[in-house]
Amino acid sequence: MAIIKLPQSVIMKIAAGEVVTGTFAVVKELFENSIDAHADEITVEIQDGGKTYIKISDNGIGMSEDEILLAVQPHTTSKIKDVEDLYSIHTYGFRGEALAAISRVSRMKITSRRKSDEIATAVEFVGSEPINVKKVMAPYGTTIEVKDLFFNLPARRKFLKSSAVEGRMVTEIIEKFIFATNVGIKFIKDKKNIYNIQKDTPLIQKINTVFPETKEEDFFELNFEENWYKIKGYISHPRVTRNNRSAQIFFVNNRYIRSGELFAVFEAGYGEMLESRRHPYGIVFFEIDPSEVDVNVHPQKLEVKISESKILYNAFKRLVRQTLLNETKFKMQISIE
Ligand code: ADP
Ligand code: MG
């Protein structure tokens, strides 16, 4: 067997597949970039689950023409300079590979204007190559359009799920951003308005919007603070449950994380108060000293390493239990009747 060195273009496409695992991953990366660019109004539009069209517009700091052209190059970032910076990170991005990866496997158009510039620049890319650079009139901020994901990787395109499934995964990502940020978010799916969240809407109202079957009274607030961590959010009354864990949404330093251990700890706090095979709602934010968290363990950043996770998880379980005991004594009696 002959060993060959892969051409750069092949290496890049393989790497792109790791970042771009579905249309939701594109939306996630672009949305995070908008937040990192200090936007406070973000509009997301998708068609066919994002398979044919994704558009994200923000009112963030924008980019110059040179910055647009640099941003789609691999390993270009404005967010860190050194590996040490990872331990004091306050932005979502740091790998500098999302735009490179997405543009590599789509037809991308970036239109951007900095506040201080009079005119915007629009650049069209095909497979990361700029094919057209124009000056256009546009409001300040950045709009990124992604068309025909994986058009140049037909085998990979086949692995995209149906428009319905891809679209649902995008919706779920948007919901996480609705909870995790205070920005205004519009979400449009196949020309239909799905969400229109005003900037600074209180969390409990957002929860009731995303889970329209719930009411404000179904939830109890968590608000707990120790020297190196905080636990905040809302958990549902033990009788307000689902048959799956889709409403258990946890964030560490505002990053959504999926952790079997956290699900288990959360429900252990409910203990015998839960009917079997029912799962409560919990939208919970853990704020931890950045020096105690390693975010650089998962390519999609869905996992983080917390150095004292045992202590934190135990505190969480106790907090859930204590909150439910305090809050439900009276209400449980009524609901038993
Ligand atoms: P990362 O987010 O890890 O830095 P990306 O490939 O996602 O890498 O983005 C590369 C760079 O492009 C960012 O560091 C930022 O400077 C710029 N950029 C991307 N999206 C935006 C945006 N919406 N507004 C302003 N600048 C952006
Ligand atoms: Mg990024």
Image (cartoon, helix red, strand yellow):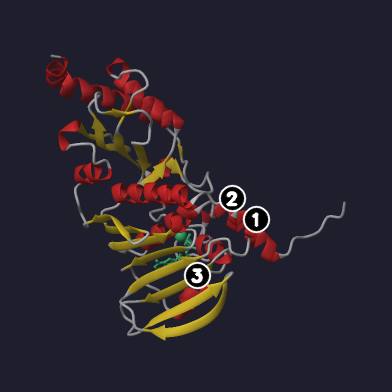
Residue 30 lies, in percent from the top left, at 43, 60
Residue 106 circle label: none
Q: What residue is pinned by disc 3?
A: 108
Percent of width and height locating residue 262: 40, 31
Whether 324 is drawn above or below 107: the answer is above
The kind of residue on which mark 2 rests is: Phe
* Foreground: disc 2 or disc 3: 2
- Is 257 or 230 nearer to us in this picture? 257
Residue position for label 1: 155
Q: Are marks 1 and 2 in contact (CB under 8 Å)?
A: yes
Q: Is residue 162 above or below residue 234?
A: below
For the question of whether residue 9 can be seen, the reply is yes
- Spatial distance from mark 2 to mark 3, Cα to Cα? 20 Å
Question: Which residue occupies 54% across, 54% down?
Answer: 19
Image check: 20 left or right of 235? right
- Amino acid type of the residue tagged 1 in the rendering: Ala
- The Cα–Cα distance between marks 3 and 1, rounded to whole angstroms, is 20 Å
Q: Residues within 10 Å of mark 3 (few under 14, many from 20)?
A: many
SS type, badge 2? loop
Q: Which residue is mark 2?
A: 159
Type of residue at label 3? Met
Nearer to us in this view, 240 or 4:
240
Nearest-to-viewer mark from 3 and 1: 1
Query: Does ligand 1 reach within 8 Å of label 1's beta carbon?
Result: no
Which element is circle 1 on?
helix
Q: Position of residue 120 (x, y in %)?
A: 38, 81
Q: Earlier in the sequence, mark 2 or mark 3?
A: 3
Q: Residue at x 32, y 25 (%)?
A: 317
> At 45% across and 52% down in the image, what residue appears?
24
Residue 93 appears in view:
no
Indicate yes or no: mark 3 CB to ligand 1 under 8 Å: no
